[in-house]
Image (tube, helix red, strand yellow):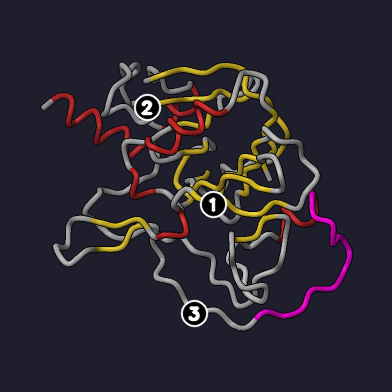
């Protein structure tokens, strides 16, 4: 019972909702989708779904050029997970599944690019490709941008809420051992000398949302995959 209560407190502190409560807002409503350095594999050229505006401004080769208007897109249900026929079980929206996409920017292979507005993380590959993952990002007031490097890696990391979080939520546990109930999930990659991490999550239904205190969260299966591909020193561009 104490473990359940502690997990509930952690979920509340991180700004999440219960797994079987309401669906969380995810998709920005996009009436036009700009092109960018990332494009879906084998996607029709006139319809992209990656929303590359910020990425294009930084890394694209079409900087300053006017963009053709794309056809209006349907309004997506605002959740990364959608209810199944059984109600409680949820299925991840395919847009947030790990997949290989085209990359047209100038970052070197091995670079991680985090597209905060569109809730995607890209790992640049050779031959004009990138691996794309769905992520959860900081809630309003907790987002950030910049260039960092992976300073440390941990498997099933322990969690100690930072002082800033404890000031907001003094009822939180001061320490939680690594494991399935830990909010940092299966893996963590620490970014520079900051408190921010790319980490897993015990709440996969929050992928695609603005939910954290600034960390980048992933599904455990995705963070394990990324963890095996990056090294300490990997460049991480957050936009």
The residue stretch that appears in magenta: 59-70
Quadrant location of the N terminus?
A: top left
Going 51% across and 46% down the picture, which residue do you hit? 133
Going 49% across and 63% down the picture, which residue do you hit? 27
Q: Percent position (x, y) of residue 28?
A: 54, 65
Residue 179 shown left or right of residue 153 in the figure = left
Badge nearest the viewer, 1 or 2: 2
The residue closer to the viewer here, 215 or 47, is 47
Q: Percent position (x, y) of residue 208?
A: 46, 53
Q: Quadrant of residue 39?
A: bottom right
Residue at the disc numbered 2 = 186
Picture layout, residue 134 above or below residue 233: below
**CA separation, marks 1 and 2?**
20 Å
Label 1 vs 2, first from the N-terminus = 1
Q: For numbered disc 3, what is the local secondary structure?
A: loop
Picture layout, residue 52 above or below residue 183: below
Give the main secondary structure, helix, strand or loop, of the magenta stretch: loop
Q: Quadrant of residue 158?
A: top left
Residue at the disc numbered 3 = 74
Q: Is residue 68 magenta?
A: yes
**CA separation, marks 1 and 3?**
19 Å
The residue closer to the viewer here, 239 or 227, is 227
Label 1 vs 3, first from the N-terminus = 3
Q: For numbered disc 1, what is the local secondary structure?
A: loop
Q: Percent position (x, y) of residue 116?
A: 60, 49
Q: Residues within 10 Å of mark 1 (few under 14, many from 20)?
A: many
Residue 163 shown left or right of residue 59 in the figure = left
Which label belongs to residue 119?
1
């Amino acid at each position: 019972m104490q473990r359940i209560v502690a997990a509930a407190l952690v979920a509340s502190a991180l700004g999440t909702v219960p797994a079987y409560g309401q669906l969380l807002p995810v998709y920005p409503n996009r009436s036009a989708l700009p092109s960018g350095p990332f494009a879906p594999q084998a996607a029709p050229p006139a319809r992209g779904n990656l929303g590359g505006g910020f990425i294009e401004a930084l890394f694209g080769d079409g900087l300053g050029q006017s963009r053709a208007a794309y056809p209006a897109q349907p309004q997506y249900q605002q959740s990364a997970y959608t209810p199944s026929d059984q109600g409680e079980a949820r299925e991840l929206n395919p847009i947030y599944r790990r997949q290989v996409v085209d990359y047209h920017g100038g970052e070197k292979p091995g670079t991680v690019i985090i597209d905060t507005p569109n809730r995607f993380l890209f790992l640049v590959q050779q031959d004009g490709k990138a691996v794309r993952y769905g992520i959860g990002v900081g809630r309003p007031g907790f987002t950030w941008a910049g260039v960092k490097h992976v300073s440390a890696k941990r498997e099933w990391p322990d969690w100690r809420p930072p002082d800033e979080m404890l000031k907001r939520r003094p009822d939180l546990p001061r320490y939680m051992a690594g494991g399935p109930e830990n909010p940092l999930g299966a893996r963590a990659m620490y970014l520079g000398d900051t408190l921010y991490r790319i980490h897993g999550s015990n709440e996969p239904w929050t992928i695609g949302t603005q939910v954290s205190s600034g960390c980048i969260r992933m599904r455990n299966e995705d963070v394990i995959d990324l963890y095996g591909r990056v090294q300490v020193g990997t460049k991480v561009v957050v936009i």
